[in-house]
Image (cartoon, rainbow, N blue to C red):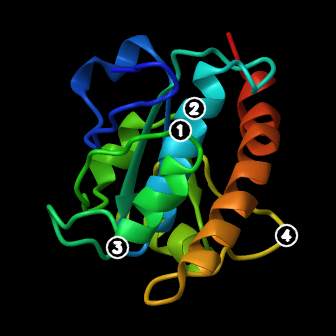
Amino acid sequence: VARANREQISHPIPRYHATMRTVLFICTGNTCRSPLAEGIAREALRSGAIEGVERDLFVASAGVHAEDGMPISEESRAALARRGIEIDGKSTPLTSEMIERADLVLGMTDSHVHSARMIAQGSETPIERLDPDGDIEDPIGQSQDVYDRVALRIESLIPVRLHELLAASRS
């Protein structure tokens, strides 16, 4: 529920997603990078910052090695709060069903992309790295400055990548 410039974020991909396109962000534990990407993407969509992509695109996140129900890191929450985004969610393990329900899966590293392709072998869902030029570092266990830097990088990539990968395929 959006309030002013804040959003509540939940993680599962609902079955009703067939009526709207879905983007799934993935990382390792679904407590740092992918929740950052999910929150930033939702805000960019809400504000209309992604040209050519519908605002009601469903955005979710999961982890290739996530434990179910772990809290999102306080540092990720803080990095999102600086952007006016409130996050309320728990970690979710990546499943083949989630990949199949998504229209696009974006991983933080080559390893995440490879893992997702192994989890959903034969899937036709595009699985790409968020940054085509390199992996996004894992900030876990590091300072708030590192989380803020990772959030800034993700924030700069999302409008470009979602436009590039979704605007041309919009029906």
Q: Position of residue 15 (x, y in %)?
A: 23, 25
Q: Which residue is label 2 attached to?
A: 43
User: What's the CA distance linking mark 4 and mark 2?
Assistant: 24 Å
Residue at screen point 25% across, 60% down: 91
The CA distance from mark 1 to mark 2 is 9 Å
x and y, in percent, of residue 57 in the image: 53, 22
**Mark closer to the observer (3, 2):** 2
Q: Earlier in the sequence, mark 3 or mark 4?
A: 3
Quarter holding residue 100: top left
Q: Amino acid at mark 4?
A: Asp
The local crowd at label 3, few if under 14, some if 14 to 19, many if 20 or more residues have their Cα within 10 Å, is: many
Quadrant for the C terminus, please: top right
The mark that comes first in sequence, 4 or 2, is 2
Q: Are marks 1 and 2 in contact (CB under 8 Å)?
A: yes
Q: Circle 3 sits in a helix, a strand or a loop, which is it?
A: loop
User: Can the viewer see residue 44?
Assistant: yes
What amino acid is found at the position of numbered circle 2 in the picture? Glu
**Tag shown at residue 161:** none
Q: Amino acid at mark 3?
A: Gly
**Distance from label 1 to label 3 (Cα)?**
24 Å
Residue carrying label 3:
29
Q: Which residue is mark 1?
A: 84
Q: Residue at x 35, y 22 (%)?
A: 17
Q: Nearer the viewer, residue 170 or 149?
A: 149
Q: Which residue carries the number 4 mark?
A: 133
